Every structure is written in C-alpha cells, then in structure tokens.
Image: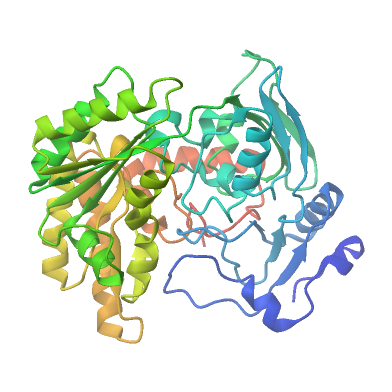
Amino acid sequence: MPTLPQRVVPRAVADPDVRLSYAVDASVTRTASPTDFEVVRARDVDDVVAVLEHAQATRTPVVPQGARTSRAGGARASEGCIVLNVEALDAIHDVDELEGYAVVGPGVVNADLKRAAASAGLFYGPDPASWETCTIGGNVATNAGGLCCVKYGVTSDWVKALQVALPGGELMRTGHRTAKGVAGYDLTGLFVGSEGTLGVVTEAVLRLEPAPDAALTALAVFDSLDAAVAGIVALRRDAHRPCLLEIIDRSSVLAIQSFGDFGFPDDCAAVLLVQSDRPGHVAEDVARYAALLASAGAVDVAVADDAQESEALLAGRRVMSTAFEAMGARLAEDVCVPIGRLADFVRGVEAIAERRSVLIPVSGHAGDGNLHPSIVHDPSDADSVDRAWQAFGDVMELGLSVGGTITGEHGVGSVKLPWLGLELGPAELARQRRLKAVFDPLEIMNPGKVFAVEA
C-alpha cells in the first residue's frame, strides 16, 4: 500500500470493503479494479495540501475524487495511488447578493448550491442529471453541463475564480471576483475541465444570476426525425431561447414505456420536451414553442398549465436512466454534434445498433446537440460486452464524422482515452501533454485519465 503523511493517517479508510467502494465511479469499464491503493477522506484544505506534498516527494499517484458520479471513468482509482476524496469540504462560505457570486468548497452538492442561491433570490445554472448527488468539484473537473445548457451554458460559464492545490502542495488562485478582469492568462478556464490532471480544486467562486420564474413544459411527438430536428432548429432560432430542450428517440421511448406507462406513443420517431422560465413570459413562451413545434410537423403537442402538469410531462424523462438500467448494463455515451446533423447522427446510431446487434437508445440535450446514446448489454455475456464496446467505438467515430466531439460534458476520463488522439491529432495531443507537465512534471495527477500513461 502507498505510504501516507502522518497528518492524514486518521483520515485514511482502514476497512478494506469500504476502501474498495472508492475504487470505482459510475462508469462501466473493462479495467479491473486496483487492489493496492489508499483512500484519504480530506476534512480541510490542509489535508489536501499534506497529501499533495507527500505525493510529490514520493512520486505517488493521486486520484482526486468527489461523489464518484463520473460516467467516463475519471474518478476511478489506479494501482498504487492515493485516492483523495474531498466530499467533506462541503461548506458554502459565502453568497454575495450584491456582487452575484457564491464561494464554495469542492464537496458542495450541486443541488445544495442551487437551494442556497434560491434562498437569496439568485440562481446557479449548471444542472447535471445527477444534480442531487454530484459535487461542484467534480462539475468543475469535467466542465459539467446538464438539461438547461441550451440557455445557461456549462460550468465554465459560471466559474469566476478557483483555489487549486498543485502537486507538491502549493496553493494557487486563478480568476477574479469582480465583474470583469483580464489580467494574465485565463488559468481558470484551463483548470475547468482538466479532470484532476493538473491539481485539486479546493474552492470555487461561482457566478449567480437573478432567479428566473418557475418553468412550464411542452411535450411534442414526431413521426419523423427530420421533423423533430426542424422543430429543434425553429426553437433555437426563436428570439427567446428555451431553458430546456430535450430529445427522446424511438428506442428510448420504448424503454421508458416498458418500465412504466408515461403516456408516450409506441410508434413515434421522437419526442421533444421544451421549457421556458423567462420572467413574466413563461406561459406566452411555451404557447409559442408549441405552435412552432406543430408547424415543424409534430403530430401531437401537450402544454402544461401549471407546475404539477409540467412535472407530469417530464416524468418519462426523469425515469429514463432507471429504465435503461432495468434492461441491463449500459455504456453511457456523451457525443456533441452540430444541431443540423442530429438526425444524421441518430440514424447512424440506429445503423450501428443493427450492425453490432445491440440496443442503443438515444436521448439528450437537443438544444445544444449533446446526445447520450446508451449502449445496453449483458455484462455476464462476453460476446455481448465485446459487441457493446465495438459499438462504443463506432459511435465515437460517427460523432467525429458529422463534425462533433467525443465528449460534451462527461469528460474523457479513462473510458474515452483511446479516442482523444483521433479528435485532437498528434500535434495537439503532444502540445496538451506539455501543458500538463508545466503543472504536473512528475505526472502524478490522475494518471491514465485524459492522456495515456507513457511507458
């Protein structure tokens, strides 16, 4: 087992079964879990500093970790590492109503920050599907997005400044708390999305905005993908963009309806869900969205009159992940493509599913082209697992072929590592490796994530 500095020995997890639970995250990988690693549950910034000082001196790998909701294998332990869990750094230090920001620890749960902001009449935009469990540190590490990205963007759009512990234990600050500031390079932007490969976020200053109105929902059913995409394009071009715009394809609808009756027709090509939260104009916007969707070719449109009806229309979307998991294990993809190529991408995934003899429901954030194909397979059947991973690679390549990217919000982690070079090319991959070496010259930070470990 790796040695630990004396200060953090009381923070180490002694029980082997509990320790093993920290070896994995929410991803499905073909890599065996390590057996030789330590887990330190930091209680304050000094614990984080002590671990990183020790790790640099002993060349011990460190895997930063929060709530372990990563779908890309970014928080999985590696052999001989120290897993540095920062969930306990969960204080909301300040909510400044005048300046419009919150200062929080990396262990603050996304939903708790939203509630704290709401109590001050403010709003924090990023809303990953795991918002009730995922932490701000992980959101920053992966540049997480969510259902409302079409209007509110991703985590990087809300991060003003960071405190980061670097390998060796040095604490650095990036960014600013003022409304503007362009002194020096944008190192905040560099750390957001770096997946723990440069350092450990120990504090974040996050932008807050005035709270919007309670959202209302419209649901539209389409009998063709092209018509659904036409509806998405019409909503994107609207002067007042929706705060949520989700697509659920035919396979996803069938999976949801197999799980429970949520009112979706079994024979549709796609369902769109759209919301507005624009202050003073919610009902007006949703009615206009419904008309646009009908003009684009929707065969049925339902519009909520109140919050209860809105939740009823969203119920099928909310159980989707559970419905997929009820069918078997799944590889959760995260491909972002141009809006105009959504139909091409979904049809391409259908062809891959047929060719590889696997089920691949496609759903996701239609408003920004970030789709989540879920490759369902039988984990006890080696052939099923092989076909699922072959399909995974096919979907990666399909996304790139239509002008997309291999990850929109989950990160590269370890799961997508083999395809990063395919997107970036050798020169850019080498340049990014050199940039990592500026902050992590010994390559101890989250090895095997984003970049392959060089022999």
Instruction: Quadrant for residue 202, please give it.
Output: top right
- The residue lying at 82 percent from left, 47 percent from top is 45
Q: Which of 1 and 71 is in front in this view?
A: 71
- Percent position (x, y) of residue 264? 21, 57
Q: Indicate left or right for 116 with 3 as reference.
A: left
Q: Indicate left or right for 66 with 218 as reference.
A: right
Q: Which of 431 and 299 is in front in this view?
A: 299
- Percent position (x, y) of residue 290? 21, 32
- Percent position (x, y) of residue 210? 58, 23
Q: How is the image coloured?
A: rainbow
Q: Where 134 falls versus 165 (above or below)?
A: below
- The residue lying at 51 percent from left, 58 percent from top is 70
Q: Where 298 falls versus 260 (above or below)?
A: above
* Residue 395 seen in render: yes
Q: Which of 88 and 282 is in front in this view?
A: 282
- The residue lying at 67 percent from left, 71 percent from top is 80
Q: Where 107 falls versus 356 (above or below)?
A: above
Q: Nearer the viewer, residue 231 or 215?
A: 215
- The residue lying at 67 percent from left, 67 percent from top is 81
Q: Indicate left or right for 306 with 95 as reference.
A: left
Q: Quadrant of the N terminus?
A: bottom right
Q: How many labels does the image show?
A: 0
Instruction: Quadrant for residue 232, please give it.
Output: top left
Instruction: Quadrant for residue 245, please give it.
Output: top left
- Percent position (x, y) of residue 416? 39, 57
* Residue 334 seen in render: no
Of all residues, the one furthest to the right in this rendering is 6
